[in-house]
Image: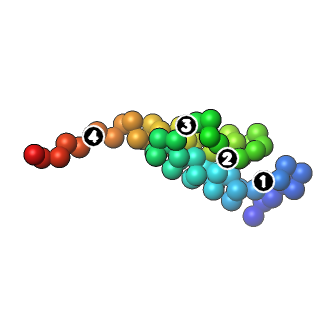
Amino acid sequence: MAKDFSLSWDIDALNQAYRHGYMSGVMGMERQKCPYQGEVVEAAWEAGWEDGFETCELKPTRQLAS
């Protein structure tokens, strides 16, 4: 695994931040609630959040039969 110690992030950390962001977006969390610090890892979380939020908005709502 490639790791850049000077920036304190690696590809696994970025993937994890993206997945967390995606789930946050799907669940409707506010975008400002990013739990990460650091420009690169925050950007990964935000990219995941945007994708998750968009996925959530694109899903048609299902009506329950009465």
As measured in the structure, the alpha-carbon distance from the residue carrying label 3 to the one carrying label 2 is 11 Å
Q: Position of residue 16 (x, y in %)?
A: 63, 56
Which residue was labeled with disc 3? 30
> Is 1 situated above or below 27?
below
Q: Please give left or right for residue 59 compared with residue 18 in the image.
A: left
Q: How would you rate the neighbour count of disc 3 (Cα within 10 Å): few for under 14, some for 14-19, many for 20 or more?
A: few
Residue visible at 70% across and 56% down in the picture: 13
x and y, in percent, of residue 54 in the image: 45, 36
Give the CA distance from mark 4 to mark 3.
Answer: 21 Å
Counting residues from the start of the chain, the first of labels 4 and 3 encountered is 3
Could you say which is closer to the camera, residue 6 or residue 56?
A: 56
Q: Secondary structure at mark 1?
A: strand
Kind of element beneath mark 4: loop
Q: Earlier in the sequence, mark 1 or mark 2?
A: 1
Residue at position x 85%, y 49% from top?
7
Q: Is residue 12 above or below residue 49?
A: below
Within-10-Å neighbours for mark 1: few <14, some 14–19, many 20+ = some
| Sequence-wise first label, 4 or 1 | 1
- Residue 61: % across, % down: 27, 40
Kindly tell me whether residue 24 is visible in this rendering.
yes
Upstream in sequence: badge 4 or badge 2:
2
Query: Which amino acid type corresponds to the residue marked 4 in the rendered image?
Result: Thr
Q: Which residue matches tag 1?
A: 9
Give the mark toward the camera: 4 or 1: 4
Q: Secondary structure at mark 3?
A: loop
Drawn side of residue 47 relative to residue 12, left or right: left
Dot 4 and dot 3 residues touching (CB under 8 Å): no
